[in-house]
Image (spheres, helix red, strand yellow):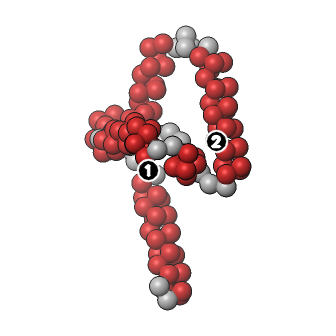
Amino acid sequence: MKSITVLSLAHVAAVGAQLGTRLLWTVLLTWPLMAAVQMMCGRIGMVTGQGLAGSFKQRFPRWLLGVFSAPLVWKGFSWLGNNLGVPKVALELGFVLWWTVPALVAVAAVLHQRALSAGAKGI
């Protein structure tokens, strides 16, 4: 799932302002392909009882899994690099990060609840 950050919102707004609706036709091609991939992954999961990575691990050699995983690892690091710059870009664009305090409170509450439940189990 694509994360929505201030940087991505600014990028989408800039591209939308520049191109308008000229690329909207691509939705007719990409949306059915996206739905087909999601359905295929769901069916593989229902049949095998495990995720896509587990199915690949049983079916393909280890070196090929590395080839499949390399772009995902690269994307993860590029996403991390982009998000480290988000607060700076947000301040430059004048965005108020109103959602950070509730998000931090929610994360703290979840972590506190997990600690309490782990303590109750004697772990």
Residue 26 image position (x, y, % from top left): 59, 16
Residue 76 image position (x, y, % from top left): 38, 43
Q: CA distance from mark 1 to mark 2?
A: 36 Å
In this view, the residue in front, 82 or 98, is 82
Q: Residue at x 46, y 26 (%)?
A: 12
Are the residues at dot 1 and dot 2 in contact (C-beta closer than 8 Å)?
no
Residue 123 drawn above or below residue 62: below
Mark 2: which amino acid?
A: Cys
Which residue is identified by label 1? 98
Q: Residue at x 48, y 13 (%)?
A: 19
Residue 75 image position (x, y, % from top left): 39, 38
Tag 1: Cα neighbours inside 10 Å, few (<14), some, or many (≥20)?
few
Q: Which mark is residue 108?
A: none
Residue 99 drawn above or below residue 9: below
Q: Which mark is residue 41?
A: 2
In this view, the residue in front, 55 or 11, is 55
- Could you tell me if residue 72 is visible in this image? no
